[in-house]
Amino acid sequence: MALMTAEEYKAKLDDGRVVYYRGERIKNVATDPNISTCVNTMAVDYEMAHDPKYKDLALVDDPELGEPVSRYYYKPQSADDLLKAYDLIVTSTALADGYIPLAHDIGSDALNAITITAHMMGNQDYMDRAENFRRYLKKEDIASCAAVTCVKGDRMLRPSDQEQLHPDYYVRVVDKNNKGIVVRGAKVHITGAAYCQEIIAVPCRQMTEQDSDYAVSFAIPPNTKGITQVIRPFRSSLSSIEFPNERPLRMHTDSLIIFDDVFIPWERVFLCGEWKFAATMVYNFALMHRRTGCAYRVPLSEQLLGMAKAIADYNGVTKAAHVREKITDLIIYLETLKALSKAACYDFVRHGDMAVPNPVTTNIAKYHFAHNYHDVVKVIQDLSGGLLVTAPTFKDYQNPDTHDFIDKYLGAKKGVSTEQRLRMLDLIRRMTGADLETICLHGEGSPMAERMTIWMEGAKVMEQCKRLVEEMAGIK
Ligand SMILES: Cc1cc2nc3c(=O)[nH]c(=O)nc-3n(C[C@H](O)[C@H](O)[C@H](O)COP(=O)(O)OP(=O)(O)OC[C@H]3O[C@@H](n4cnc5c(N)ncnc54)[C@H](O)[C@@H]3O)c2cc1C
């Protein structure tokens, strides 16, 4: 099968999947008036693959299949491959106004983690299953998502210790036979699951022997019997009180996915009881996905810088010393993120037959982004002034009774129209709300998860530095 067009991708979504939104079951996600916006966002990946301007970036000639396939499913071999994948994520996110299309990237992060784990285990069966599954994704050009985060219950209790409430806070194997396994439990916050074609599930934490049933990884189509999704849109659409905008609206939904005794055939099982390797899989997923996450955030950081400069210019304050200081901080923020993300590709490590971005640099890049994000937002809100939340609405600007007053009194610097200023404030309000603040903090793991990885991965450097000063101090 050749690469899918956006229309072919959408047509395949009418497959009986069980998805609920606002208390009602959605008949077809691709045509539903609310969710189709998200489907169109994911479709950007398919549009790029057929666009002469982006084709070379979106696709790669696959030596095994002898045909072009999505770059995401291709196993990176070099720094150049990693940098091209980074460029692809930055470009597609910028094209979708700061929304990653998500058709292949997060799923490929899970797939790569599965492949690396199978190699580390030295388990030929799992290696073969992972390769067969990859071949299928490439050949059929499948849209996939990664279901990692379990609902988790009491965070301080291990999966097998949650029995006092119920044993299903982490997805687990409840039955096995010669054809496959049966899984029960729920994953949460899973972006794009409602309109992808494969859900790739990976454990979300390290496990002990008692947690063996919870050490499970698999892939399954969303319309499989026993799967129910309850979704919520990430960021609400343009409201009627904001200035209308002709650019296509971009959006995603995040799913609570319930696996109510779902059968998974063995060929789609990638971990089943090997508890020691649950940590390996989630660690490698986090590494891959944090690199992806840093690339998502480059266009967003550019937008943040742009908004700060625009509103400072419109308000006439750009020349003030403290404003220049604050905007300079935003330039440093953006350029540090770009430099660290690229450095992680150049300074890659090798796992099996795959080049993998440098773990320490990747985690520092992601931590830099998440840790400083709220300070960046603070600068923009500071420069915007109170009108950010008190400006009269578009409807009042339209009303002839009030239009001229608003136009006269809410102008600022000469040459900048009131409408221009109010439109920019609408955009800032949309781009700095709680949804984005939360994804920037928690997406790809909370900041503490990045710090823990930096501590673990930094152990060798720490010891070397300690040895260095011991030598300087004459300590043998
Ligand atoms: C918009 C959005 C999209 C997402 N998309 C996906 C997706 O597509 N796929 C996916 O798998 N996940 C996804 N995530 C999940 C994301 O990775 C998690 O939100 C993140 O890992 C944090 O987990 P949590 O939300 O359960 O928070 P919690 O685990 O409840 O964390 C809350 C706080 O508690 C702390 N904490 C938690 N456990 C412990 C502990 N044992 N000891 C000490 N401190 C602890 C954390 O450090 C944090 O400070 C998404 C999240 C968001 C917000």
Image (cartoon, grey):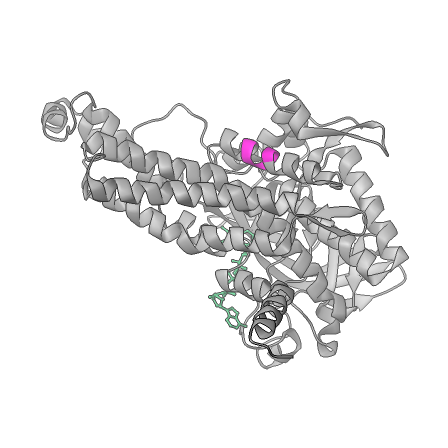
141 sits left or right of 422 in the view: right
343 sits left or right of 111 in the view: left
- The quarter of the picture where the N terminus appears is top right
Quadrant for residue 213, please give it. Answer: bottom right
Where does the image place residue 170, in percent across and percent down from the top left? Answer: 63, 67
Tell me if I can see residue 132 in this picture: yes
- The quarter of the picture where the C terminus appears is bottom right
Of residues 146 and 347, which is closer to you in this image? 347
Q: What residue occupies the far front of the structure in this picture?
A: 474
- In the rendered image of this protein, does residue 154 appear above or below residue 397? below
Where does the image place residue 54, in percent across and percent down from the top left? Answer: 62, 23
**Residue in the image at 55% along x and 41% along y:** 295
Residue range in magenta is 87-91
Where does the image place residue 98, in percent across and percent down from the top left? Answer: 47, 36
Dominant secondary structure of the magenta stretch? helix
Q: Would residue 27 be counted in the magenta stretch?
A: no
Q: Would residue 90 be counted in the magenta stretch?
A: yes
